[in-house]
Amino acid sequence: QCMLTMDLKLHIDPDQCVYCAYDSNIPEAESVLITFEQAINRCRQDGIKRILLDYQTRTSYPAAVERIIVATELANLYKNHLSSGGVPIRFALFTRKNLST
């Protein structure tokens, strides 16, 4: 696992990057999948090749089994995006420095 910790200020150009923030009102796995799918769709529609997922408001990680299920579903969403003619997309995920497990 590679982790880079830093304080930074971001300027996000909405024409170059899709910015998505975690919605704590939706269950964890569902929120991640909905957010990711919407971001991929926006990239496809607008020709954007970068997604920034901001999960700094999260306070803990989901259980290991849930993380595996979500990761598999995310991989499938991305695979479907590519197989249906989508271009490769770069992803970045921001989380809090200290999350409980």
Image (cartoon, helix red, strand yellow):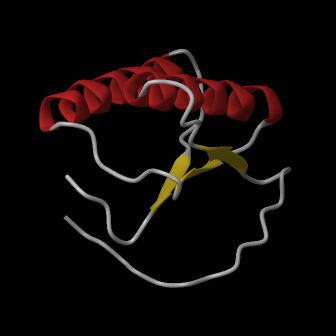
Q: Is residue 85 left or right of residue 41?
A: left
Q: Residue drawn 26% across and 39% down? A: 62
Residue 27: % across, % down: 44, 24
Q: Is residue 95 left or right of residue 2?
A: right
Q: Residue 5 appears in which quarter of the rendering?
A: bottom left
Q: Residue drawn 38% across and 72% down? A: 97
Residue 17: % across, % down: 72, 52
Depth check: 40 or 4 in front?
Answer: 4
Residue 64: % across, % down: 14, 38
Depth check: 17 or 97 in front?
Answer: 97
Q: Residue drawn 18% across and 36% down? A: 63
Picture layout, residue 10 above or below residue 56: below
Q: Residue drawn 61% across and 82% down? A: 8
Outermost residue, left direction? 65
Residue 41: % across, % down: 67, 24
Picture layout, residue 2 above or below residue 90: below
Q: Residue 46 appears in which quarter of the rendering?
A: top right
Q: Quadrant of the N terminus?
A: bottom left
